[in-house]
Amino acid sequence: MRFVDLSAPITANATANPAFLRTEIVFSDHQEGSGHIQALFRVPSALLRNQEGWAIETFTNFGTHNSTHVDAPWHYNSQIQGERAATIDELPLEWFFSDGVVLDMTAKADGDGVTVNDIERELARIGYQLKPLDIVMVRTGCDRFYQDANYLFRGPGVTADATRWLYAQGIRVMGIDAWGWDVPLDRQAQETLAKQQPGIFWAAHQVDLAYSQIERLMNLDQLPPYGFKVSCFPLKIVGGSAGPARVVAMV
């Protein structure tokens, strides 16, 4: 069995992103750890191996959407189909370990929409028929821009109609190797303001369906189109709109 890490690295990027997207980490080394031990338990560093205590890290700013993460329906709207939307801790674990499918959409340009026809053509090309609870991941190639300042604005996105179509096939977890599932938000904002109508901005998120997205995947190019398992369990954040996840494919 071969394991493929589909998760982005978590690094401090205090100046690279808008304030609400910044990741800030404080690292405490072994010398500081020995001071903690002496303060808490009165054990001097001379009685520790190599006079060292524990090393620890503290997130001083880390949003649930700052890294590779799984979105809950609560992220999209407060209500889904007239009922309170589920938070990340309320979703069934069965959703997050299943057969994976990769749809190659690397031919799509920035701002293009991935349509139902695109998905059907790709499934026909790879010779695969979706089944309920498959984890469908859209490969755009945008993971190569992960460290770039304009990553937020790169890549295609999945249309609302395609999202509904996947849901109708029984798909409850769908992911992408771009910043978000929708077409880049700056383009949706421009169209929304130009047309002055709802239903354009964040269209695929707000389809009124109880499903989860994995955003900011990596390394989908290392996978076959199907024939592998995906584990994408999100952190159990009570009341959370998302949970960071270590997404791994098992080929």
Image (cartoon, rainbow, N blue to C red):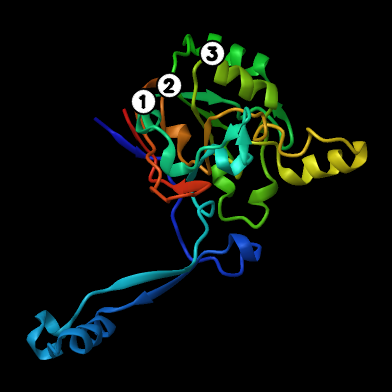
Q: Nearer the viewer, residue 47 or 118?
A: 47
Residue at 53 percent of width and 44 percent of height: 216
Q: Nearer the viewer, residue 198 or 78?
A: 78
Q: Which image quarter holds the N terminus?
A: top left
User: In the rendered image, which residue does mark 1 sit on?
Assistant: 98
Residues at marks 1 and 2 touching, judged by CB atoms closer than 8 Å: yes
Q: Earlier in the sequence, mark 1 or mark 3?
A: 1
- What is the quadrant of residue 144 in the picture? top right
User: In the rendered image, which residue does mark 2 sit on?
Assistant: 133
Label 2, label 3: how many angstroms apart (C-alpha)? 16 Å
Q: Earlier in the sequence, mark 1 or mark 2?
A: 1
Residue 86 percent location from the top left of the image: 51, 38
Label 1, label 3: how many angstroms apart (C-alpha)? 18 Å
Q: Which image quarter holds the C terminus?
A: top left
- What is the quadrant of residue 231 in the picture? top left
Residue 239 percent location from the top left of the image: 48, 49
User: In the rendered image, which residue does mark 3 sit on?
Assistant: 123
Image position of 16 (left or right of 220): right
| Count of numbered labels shown in the rendering | 3
Amino acid type assigned to the residue bearing label 1 in the image: Ser
Residue at 70 percent of width and 36 percent of height: 183
49 w.r.t. 240: above or below:
below
Q: Earlier in the sequence, mark 2 or mark 3?
A: 3
Residue 85 percent location from the top left of the image: 56, 37
